[in-house]
Image (cartoon, grey):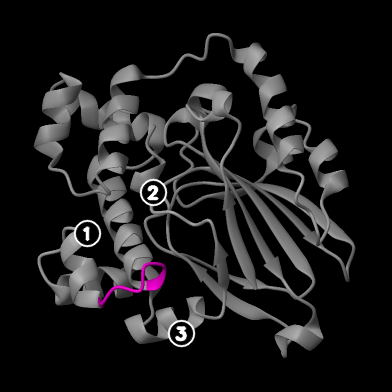
């Protein structure tokens, strides 16, 4: 299995965190018919495109942010393509302000019936790597929303939380956003579907996982650098999010080749 993250076109970076691709090999390579995959929460809304070669099955979903890991059965000979939005920007680009997308998976046509992803779905195959096609598709959408109307204070709070890997006090975020706690919390949840504390917790956990798995640091060093009080605190958060023991979770993700994956806080411009 291969998981890869790809940076979007520079003009898209204020709105798109990254693209991601998850490829599941054939039955012979995988050695089983399906795998229960666990992906740590990222705090973002994603447009997800799926193609299964055996069943010739294609579909598009909107995946809302979750505070827990996404657990799903993945089939062999499949590719998943995700467009991950900066928290708050999906709400700004698409008229879904009265819809709470937290912990929601919904077919694209039910939520955004006028958004045509067929050009991307038609090109999606097991060897897909034409991310310029994704860039061009999204760049064509921007003029329709020019200027993009987003909550500037919320966006600043999102950037502060993410750039610090979640290791920042909410009081400090509020001070820099120049809003009262009540105002900022309400507007933040309205735009991102999460509380600031929830997003910070997600960023901190992903940073610790990246340091352990990608940087090959010891768990004790990783959790300290990610801002945890101690290892038991980290173990509790990891188990709460993934419903797996840390050793089982790391055994699972060790079966996946990770390419160009970076902690969320490194994506701050």
Could you give the CA–CA distance between mark 1 and mark 2, rounded to whole angstroms?
A: 12 Å
What element does badge 2 sit on? helix
- Give the magenta range: 213-218
Report if residue 95 is visible in the image. no
**Nearer the N terminus, badge 3 or badge 1?**
1
- Residue at the location (72% across, 90% down)? 31
User: Which residue is labeled 1 in the image?
Assistant: 226
Answer yes or no: is residue 22 visible: yes
Give x and y (percent) for residue 146: 58, 9
Q: Quadrant of the C terminus?
A: top left
Residue 58: which disc?
A: none
Q: Which residue is mark 3?
A: 251
Q: Position of residue 164 (x, y in %)?
A: 24, 44
Instruction: Please report the residue visible at 56 percent of the width from the left and 80 percent of the height from the top.
Output: 255
In the rendered image, the vertical position of residue 253 relative to residue 109, given as above or below: below
Q: Nearer the viewer, residue 152 or 4?
A: 4
Q: Which numbered disc covers residue 264?
A: 2
**Residue 264 left/right relative to 30:** left
Is the N terminus in the top left, top right, bottom left or bottom right quadrant? bottom right
Nearer the N terminus, badge 1 or badge 2?
1
């Amino acid at each position: 299995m291969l998981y890869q993250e790809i940076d979007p076109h520079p003009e898209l970076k204020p709105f798109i965190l990254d693209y991601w691709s998850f490829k599941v090999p054939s039955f012979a390579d995988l050695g089983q018919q399906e795998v229960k995959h666990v992906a740590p929460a990222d705090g973002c809304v994603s447009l997800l495109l799926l193609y299964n070669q055996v069943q010739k099955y294609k579909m598009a979903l909107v995946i809302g942010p979750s505070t827990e890991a996404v657990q799903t059965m993945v089939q062999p000979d499949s590719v998943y393509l995700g467009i991950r939005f900066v928290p708050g920007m999906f709400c700004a680009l698409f008229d879904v302000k009265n819809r709470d997308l937290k912990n929601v998976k919904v077919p694209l046509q039910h939520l955004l019936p006028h958004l045509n992803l067929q050009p991307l779905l038609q090109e999606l195959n097991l060897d897909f790597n034409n991310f310029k096609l994704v860039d061009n598709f999204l760049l064509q959408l921007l003029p329709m929303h020019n200027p993009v109307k987003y909550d500037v204070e919320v966006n600043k709070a999102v950037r502060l939380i993410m750039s610090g890997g979640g290791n920042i006090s909410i009081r400090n975020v509020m001070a820099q956003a120049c809003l009262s706690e009540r105002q900022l919390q309400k507007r933040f949840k309205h735009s991102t579907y999460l509380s600031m504390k929830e997003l910070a917790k997600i960023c901190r956990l992903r940073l610790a996982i990246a340091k352990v798995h990608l940087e090959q640091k010891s768990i004790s060093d990783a959790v300290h650098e990610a801002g945890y009080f101690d290892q038991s605190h980290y173990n509790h958060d990891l188990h709460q999010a993934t419903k797996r023991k840390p050793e089982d979770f790391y055994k699972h993700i060790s079966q996946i080749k990770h390419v160009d994956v970076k902690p969320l806080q490194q994506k701050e411009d």
